[in-house]
Image (cartoon, rainbow, N blue to C red):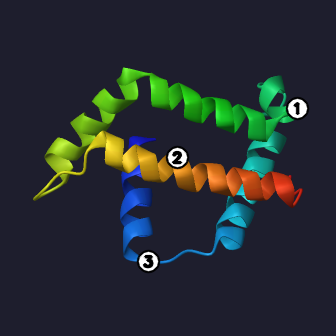
Amino acid sequence: MVRHIYDTYRLQQSTTFDLAELAGLIAEGMKMDRDRYGPQHPEFAADPIGVMRFGLDVIAGDPLYKDRYEAFVKPMVYGDALTWDEAFRVFEAVARQALDHIEQHELI
């Protein structure tokens, strides 16, 4: 997970992205996960967007993810390391925009 947070920040800073296209890709992944893992995770099957939003809240409030991020960044990134707060702020904003788009356009 922490790798996605770092990569999302770097991608968002280096290029513009099409929210509709990103949301469509995320929605397709969520559909595949719901179909594949829905019986094991009925909460996700019933409300995948709600579960994803809850997951963002958990990650934001649990210091374990910050610790894992810092452990990832230290050996992998040369130069100025991107802080957890900077990286997660961008990741969370992009993720919430995509989830809002998925919900508004009923993509899942």
Residue 46 placement (x, y as % from top left): 88, 32
Q: Which residue is pictured at 44% across the width and 67% down the height?
A: 12
Q: Is the Cβ of the residue at disc 3 closer than 8 Å to that at disc 1? A: no
| Tag 1: amino acid | Ala
| Tag 2: amino acid | Glu
Residue 53 image-quadrant placement: top right
Q: Is the Cβ of the residue at disc 1 closer than 8 Å to that at disc 2? A: no
Residue 99 placement (x, y as % from top left): 71, 51
Work out whether 100 lies above or below 17. above
Q: Which residue is pictured at 65% across the width and 55% down the height?
A: 97
Numbered disc 3: secondary structure = loop
Mark 2, Cα crowd under 10 Å, few <14 / some 14-19 / many 20+, is: some
Left or right: where 102 falls relative to 11: right
Numbered disc 1: secondary structure = helix
* Badge 3 or badge 2: first in the primary sequence: 3
Which residue position is annotated with label 3? 15
Q: Which residue is pictured at 63% across the width and 49% down the height?
A: 96
Left or right: where 88 falls relative to 106: left
Which residue position is annotated with label 2? 92
Q: Nearer the viewer, residue 45 or 62?
A: 62
How far is disc 3 from disc 2 in space, using C-alphas?
Answer: 17 Å
Q: Nearer the viewer, mark 1 or mark 2?
A: 2
Which residue position is annotated with label 1? 46
How far is disc 1 from disc 2 in space, using C-alphas?
Answer: 22 Å
* Badge 1 or badge 2: first in the primary sequence: 1
* Badge 3 or badge 1: first in the primary sequence: 3
Q: Nearer the viewer, mark 3 or mark 1?
A: 3
Numbered disc 2: secondary structure = helix
| Tag 3: amino acid | Thr
Work out whether 56 lies above or below 82. above
How far is disc 3 from disc 1 in space, using C-alphas?
Answer: 34 Å
